[in-house]
Image (spheres, rainbow, N blue to C red):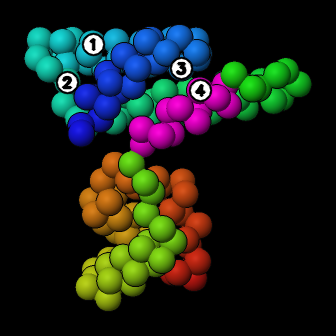
């Protein structure tokens, strides 16, 4: 099932169940934002990639809100609940083993670093993003890349 269809299905189930107002409100907002993206750009349906980007944006914003609430010493239960709901819609990130294998393969297949420090690291990060697409999180992969490259 596509991401957009899954969100719509989950929203409908949440509305019918009437047991989780936070989930219903979040999915309503998320669904509306996803629908708006395609309509705003070219009056068309939103693509799966665009929908995934909207979910990632919501996760990022919720993460920032969580950080702000923690710094202020306030209750974070609701935002943690929202984050758990949102993260369920993100594709599974590559495992450390998958990253290490991909990095080794990229490094073995390239010798064009241009003599610049960090060029290999940039090349590896770009290739990982191309390889894993929506599953790739640069911030999570950076320490693995640094460890494997010895930098």
Mark 2–mark 4 distance (CA, rounded to whole Å): 23 Å
Q: CA distance from mark 2 to mark 1?
A: 8 Å
N-term-proximal mark, 2 vs 1? 1
* Residue 29 seen: no
Label 3 neighbourhood size at 10 Å, few (<14), some (14-19), many (20+)? many
For label 3, the SS is helix
Residue interval drawn in magenta:
79-90
Label 3 sits on residue: 23
What is the distance, in whole Å, between disc 2 and disc 3 at their CAs? Answer: 22 Å
x, y (%) of residue 116?
41, 74
Q: Going 76% across and 26% down the picture, which residue do you hit?
A: 76
Tag 2 and tag 1, C-beta contact below 8 Å = yes
Please identify the quadrant where the C terminus is shown: bottom right
Residue 36 - label: 1
- Which residue is rendered at x = 64% and y = 29% of the image? 81
Residue 146, image x, y percentages: 56, 73
Residue nearest the viewer, comparing 15 with 60: 15
Looking at the rendering, which quadrant does residue 75 occupy? top right
Whether residue 73 appears in this view of the structure is yes
């Amino acid at each position: 099932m596509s991401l957009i269809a899954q969100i719509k299905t989950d929203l409908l189930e949440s509305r019918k169940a009437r047991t989780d107002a936070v989930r219903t409100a979040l999915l309503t907002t998320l669904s509306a934002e996803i629908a708006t993206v395609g309509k705003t750009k070219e009056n068309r349906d939103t693509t799966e990639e665009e929908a995934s980007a909207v979910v990632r944006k919501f996760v990022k914003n919720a993460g920032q809100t969580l950080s702000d609430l923690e710094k202020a010493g306030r209750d974070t239960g609701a935002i943690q609940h929202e984050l758990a709901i949102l993260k369920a819609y993100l594709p599974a990130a590559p495992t450390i083993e998958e990253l290490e294998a991909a990095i080794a393969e990229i490094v073995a297949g390239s010798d064009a670093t241009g003599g610049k420090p960090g060029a290999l690291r940039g090349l590896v990060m770009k290739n990982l993003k191309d390889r894993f697409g929506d599953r790739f999180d640069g911030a999570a992969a950076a320490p693995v890349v640094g460890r494997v490259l010895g930098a």
